[in-house]
Image (cartoon, rainbow, N blue to C red):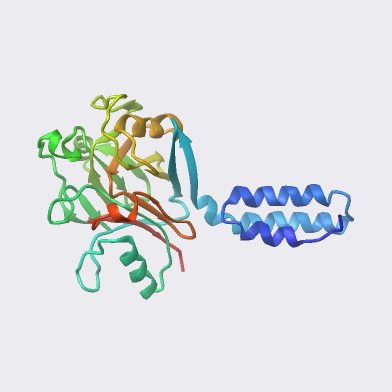
Amino acid sequence: MPCGGSALAKACAASDHRRMIRSIFHFVMRHARCSSRYWLLVVLALVYVSGCTRSAHALDSDEVAFAGQNYRVVKIDLRHEVLSLHWRNPDDGQAFASIDSLRRWGEAHNQHLLFAANAGIYDKQFAPLGLHVENGKTLVPLNLAHGNPSAGNFSLLPNGVFVIYPDGRAAVRTSADFKTDKKDALWATQSGPMLVIGGKLNEQFLDDSGSVKWRSGVCAKTPTEVVFAVSEAPVNFHTFARLFRDQLGCHDALYLDGSISRLYVDGQDYAGAPNFMVKPYAGIFAVFAKP
């Protein structure tokens, strides 16, 4: 086969960084007998791909199979990407309510939406039911009221908080522990129940439960690596919690919401609940492309 560089363009055009690396590998193998100038081209290509995959490493989206079910999993490196939380449009005070609305707002302000997911549980007025902090400002305080667990997931204890602190480090804490910590939050949402607590599944969950829904959740696998996941079909709490503990390696994980839950990744569209199930959101996590 004649020497050529078409594989290099294909490599960097690939949306998944692993496909990029595989493309470069196959390029090297096909042209292993080429002259030294092509080996130089290969070296330059690897340097180039390492640059064009920076965002792929910082915001990585994968389809994950676990226990007979598929999930969309998005990993965000907080060292390179800014994960923010949005409820109301700052221009008019109206709730964004949908990911599409937030995306259009971003475009109007020269910000390209890379990722979005619905945040914590909300009430009948489509306002956050628990803690909601945006850019250091507490819009809704921590809610430690204990209701009837049969009336909603928020009261299936313990519930918890996903928080990003002012130093850029993230964590999932039970609501009680978050209160005890007395740490300021830069971004935070309260939801429930906790899926994984200290490496153990929530004791409220039954492995043979027939209560199945589309489900979404979040964990901070490390203080700088946040992991979101949504099921591609209905699952029960026990299976969803095991995904976070056994497949994703999360020590603490928080349930976000049920049958309305979706993840949006630029170039991959939506994953999660079908469109007809979706209702207005009270909070939306987002990553916008840096200028």
- The quadrant in which the N terminus is found is bottom right
x, y percentage for residue 192?
23, 39
x, y percentage for residue 163?
30, 46
Quarter of the rendering containing residue 220: top left
Residue 52 in the figure: left or right of residue 180: right
Residue at image x 46%, y 69%?
A: 291
Quarter of the rendering containing residue 6: bottom right
Q: Is residue 206 above or below residue 133?
A: above
x, y percentage for residue 200?
33, 25
Task: Decide if residue 186 is in sight here.
Answer: no
* Pick the front one: 173 or 53: 53
Q: Is residue 257 above or below residue 235?
A: below
Quarter of the rendering containing residue 146: top left
Residue 93 in the figure: left or right of residue 28: left
The extreme front residue here reads: 276
Q: Is residue 45 above or below residue 148?
A: below
Residue at image x 23%, y 58%?
A: 280
* Pick the front one: 270 or 76: 270
x, y percentage for residue 101?
31, 66
Task: Decide if residue 210 is in sight here.
Answer: yes
User: Total label count?
Assistant: 0
Residue at image x 32%, y 29%?
A: 238
